[in-house]
Amino acid sequence: MLVTYDGIVIARREVGENSVFIDILTDEQGIIEASAHGANKINSSILSAAALFSYSTFSLSKNKLRYTVNSAKPKFTFHELGKDIEKLALASYFAQSVRYCTPSEQPQDSIVRFFAIALFEIMHGRPLASVKAAFELRYSRELGFAPNLVGCDNCGEYDCADGMYFLPDKAKLICADCLYVDNAVKLLPETLFAMRNIIFSPLDRAFRFNISKDAEKQLGDICESYFLSRVERSFPTLTYYKKIKIN
Ligand SMILES: [Zn+2]
C-alpha cells in the first residue's frame, strides 16, 4: 500500500553504511518508523528530506506495520539548528518529549504544526528559556493537562492586588485572599501573564511574550516541573540541555 504524509523527522538511527531508520512525526498516524534505504548516500534524492528536523512530504510504502520511504521532498528545513549546540540540544529535548508522548498509528491533532512552530521559535532568536517554558506548558495543554488559569479557583478573582498563587498539583490558581494551602507558588505578575499567554493564545502566538529575567526564571521552573510531573518522567536530552546551556 502506498501512502503520502507530511511530517517532521524527529529521530534517526543509522543502519549499516547507507541506510537509516527515521521516526516521522505526522498528524495522520502519530509517529511512523520508516526505513530509508540509501538515505546517507551523498547522491541520494532523500538525503536532505530524511535529515533530522526536516519537514518533508514522504511517499511511503506500507507492508503490514513496516514503512519504507519511496521518495521524499523537503518542504522546510530546520537544519540551521545544527549550527548552535544549545539550540540543537533544546530541539532534541522537544523531539524526545514528542516521541515519548505521541502514540504510533493514531491520528493527532495539529502535532506537526505545534512542533514546527516550536522549532521555528528556537531557530529565530527568541530567548531559549522562554521557548522551553512555552513548549512545556502548551504541550501539557495539547496532551490534555491544561491548568485552569482563568481566575482564582475559589472566588473567581482574575488578578488579586495581594497576589495570585499557582497550585501545581491541582493545576489551579488561588488568590491571596482565598489561600489555604502551603504548596502554592506566589506568581510574579509577569509570570502569570506569560502563563496565560501560553495557554490561551492561538498556537502561533503562544511562544510570543516578553518577560524579565526574574520572571523568566520562575516561569521556567514552574513549566518544567509541571510538564515533567504530568508525563511522569524526565528526559536525558533535558539533562544534557541544562548542562550545556549558557545561562
Ligand atoms: Zn479567591
Image (spheres, helix red, strand yellow):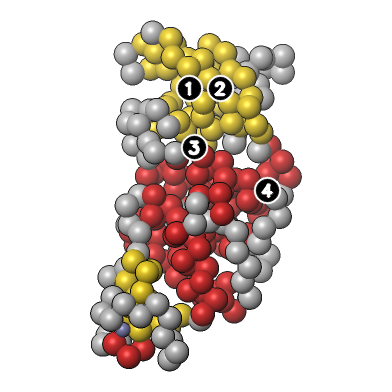
Mark 1, Cα crowd under 10 Å, few <14 / some 14-19 / many 20+, is: some
Mark 2 or mark 3, which has the lower sequence index? 2
Residue 115, position in %: x, y?
A: 52, 43
**Marking on residue 123:** 4
Q: CA distance from mark 3 to mark 4?
A: 16 Å
Mark 1 or mark 4, which has the lower sequence index? 1
Q: Secondary structure at mark 4?
A: helix
Q: Secondary structure at mark 1?
A: strand
Q: CA distance from mark 1 to mark 4?
A: 24 Å
- Asked whether disc 4 touches disc 2, contact meaning CB atoms under 8 Å apart, the reply is no
Q: Give the left or right position of residue 244, taking residue 164 as reference.
A: right
Indicate which quadrant contains ligand 1: bottom left
Q: Amino acid at mark 2?
A: Thr
Which residue matches tag 3?
A: 112
Q: Amino acid at mark 3?
A: Val
Q: Secondary structure at mark 2?
A: strand
Which residue matches tag 1?
A: 5
Residue 86, position in %: x, y?
A: 66, 54
